[in-house]
Amino acid sequence: MAKYLLVSFKTCPWVQRAAIVLREKNIDFELRHIDRDNRPDWFLAISPHKKVPVLSIDGTVSLFESNAINEYLDETIEPRLHPKDPVQRAINRAWTDYLPTFSEMVTGQAYADDEAEYKEAIAKIPQAFERLEGALQKQGAGPFFNGAKYSLVDAAYAPFLQRYYYLDRIKPLGVIEKFPRVKAWAEALMKRPSTHSFPEAEFEALYRLNVKLRKKYLSQFVADQAVAAE
Ligand SMILES: N[C@@H](CCC(=O)N[C@@H](CS)C(=O)NCC(=O)O)C(=O)O
């Protein structure tokens, strides 16, 4: 078996997306965290965009961009997470293509500078959920995107749905409750062990700390870290 090294910033959702697929496929891998503010030379040499994730294979090949990494893993290692049917595969790829838009719409609130920007950002969340609610209705009965079988779409959305919950516990909005299929899907993904790279309470506390230290509008609503970590 090849040797896989996944290079990461600890709270990066795009890294988490690739780590989930490695776990779903039962692949041994090293998750190596580097410092965002002091990226080592060996990393800069293998990451064309200077971003994480990078997946290094046997120390000889380096792949970047979470979607490309996951497609590669799915092409090379069983079990195949993409559907066999080409139409379903195209639909799955279309929804993973939508992920950057979804992530911006659902977690953009964390980067708003003031209340006006925050209000603008949160107004986009129902639109993003509504689109997914429609997709889930077409796909079937759940619990996962394609039904009973876990897919690359599940791995893609899990980190961002998790962050929606984290943000909703900082300043509650209760949007997901209005979209029953998205809510049931998100709950199934939060229960799936592969979603988690770290113990859940520890990871949420770290996320909250990041939001607090970012000094954006939402930072003021993060309760004391000791309380948050309870
Ligand atoms: N489209 C990329 C996004 C990766 C990304 O934005 N990574 C962030 C960390 S979560 C990063 O490395 N940012 C550093 C930078 O932009 O300089 C992917 O899917 O892999």
Image: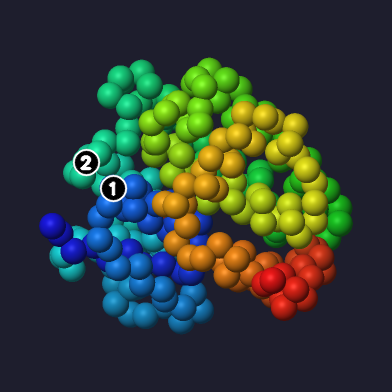
Q: Amino acid at mark 2?
A: Glu
- Is residue 135 visible from the viewing direction of this image? no
Note whether ligand 1 is within 8 Å of mark 2.
Answer: no
Q: Is residue 198 above or below residue 123?
A: below
Return the x and y of residue 33 as percentages of the image width and height. 41, 73
Q: Which mark is residue 38?
A: none
Disc 2 target residue: 78
**Inter-mark Cα distance, 2 to 1:** 7 Å
Name, please, the residue furthest toward the right. 115
Q: Residue at x 71, y 38 (%)?
A: 176
Return the x and y of residue 52 as percentages of the image width and height. 41, 63
Q: Do residues under tags 2 and 1 come within 8 Å of each other at their CB atoms?
A: yes
Quarter of the image containing the C terminus? bottom right
Left or right of 48 on screen, residue 37: right
Quarter location, residue 27 = bottom left
Q: Is residue 46 above or below residue 35?
A: above
Q: Residue at x 49, y 74 (%)?
A: 36
Of 4 and 96, nearer the camera is 4
Left or right of 172 on screen, residue 100: left
Q: Secondary structure at mark 1?
A: loop
Q: Residues within 10 Å of mark 2 (few under 14, many from 20)?
A: few
Return the x and y of residue 167 as percentages of the image width and height. 70, 55
Disc 1 target residue: 25
Return the x and y of residue 25 as percentages of the image width and height. 28, 47
Q: Residues within 10 Å of mark 1 (few under 14, many from 20)?
A: some
Q: Amino acid at mark 1?
A: Lys
Quarter of the image containing the N terminus? bottom left
